[in-house]
Image (cartoon, rainbow, N blue to C red):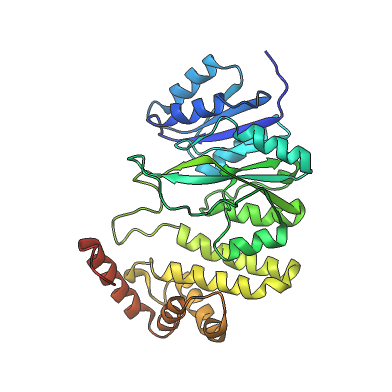
Amino acid sequence: MEHRVLVSVIVPCYNIETYLERCVDSIRRQTCRELEILLVDDGSTDATGALCDRFAALDERIRVFHKENGGSSSARNLGIDNARGQWLGFVDSDDWIEPEMYESLLRTAEERGTRIVQASRDEIGENGEKYPDVCPPPEQLTVCPARDFLRELLLHRGDCSFCTKLVKRELFEGRRFPEGKLNEDFFLLVNMLPEAGEVCILPRQMYHVFYRSGSNTRKKDPEDFSRVFLDIVDNADFVEGLVGRKYPELRTEAVRFALYQRLDYLLHIPVSRMTEADDFYVRVKKYLKSHVKDTLTNPYLTAKNRVYLLLLTMAPKTVRQLHARKMKAQKKNPDASC
């Protein structure tokens, strides 16, 4: 039976049979009834696809799409293309949400005329322990102009995840998640912020991020190097250009962001890849050398950031080797002082 759809919730699903039911049940229990759920099976090789079909048989609001594996962005984009709602939300298939989340977000968006509304989130471990907040929630409902929200992102204090947000469908016109990339939420959100105008943030932690072993950035082999460390540098370059065009007053914050992302890259790249044959690595080194003054004077870098950046500018390979040994020693003896 057809029903009126205001909110489309898109869930990319890949080999997630253990946790999918908790996720889907939390969306089915939403107090916002004018809602549809799009489960996109991204070429799963376990029972995930069959579970999606079973859920659809139980609830007429659920639609299932099966596709070849293409990654989370590809699955999300398929969901966007098929969504019927005026508002779009996204939930990762191992996370879960509070029953009132979408009703609260929708009501706030309609009352304020805001096109991006955000719930606060918390992070839960496999044993049920709550981790320290990555993005501390505001004390009260907060309206953040696009410029200020971007500034928070550049200072690593904002939440770029689309999973905590309800977004007006029109903001996706001509925009999609970049496929084959990681850190894709940051790229798309920064791209649409100027048009959105503002982000309204609710204080209650209604989205629960589930941290489990085996994610893209939790590799144990020292030679493994997630492409996320390349993409965060590319995104830093993108946002530095955007700031130059639209928010020149944020130049200091944008350069700090670019330096910090390169620091993250250099502290994770395997030493074996730190060669002149690696064009990306060479470009990172050149940027650091051309921004030594910014490294010394940027007020948003910590003293530790500055020391690492300057040392990596002068002797990147040696510093990376020493840092790797330090991290290895700390893993063996986590109680040892730094």
Q: Nearer the viewer, residue 314 or 280?
A: 314
Q: Nearer the viewer, residue 114 or 14?
A: 114
Q: Position of residue 253 (x, y in %)?
A: 62, 71
Q: Nearer the viewer, residue 174 or 7?
A: 7
Q: At x 48% / y 46%, what residue is drawn?
A: 122
Q: Position of residue 177 (x, y in %)?
A: 61, 47
- Can residue 83 be seen from the camera position used here? no
Q: At x 74% / y 57%, what residue is drawn?
A: 194
Q: Nearer the viewer, residue 212 or 303?
A: 303
Q: At x 44% / y 37%, what residue is drawn?
A: 94
Q: Quadrant of the N terminus?
A: top right
Q: At x 53% / y 78%, what residue is drawn?
A: 287
Compared with 246, 67 (above or below) is above
214 displayed left or right of 282: left
- Can residue 88 be seen from the camera position used here? yes
Compared with 272, 149 (above or below) is above
Among all residues in the image, which is located at the extreme front?
139
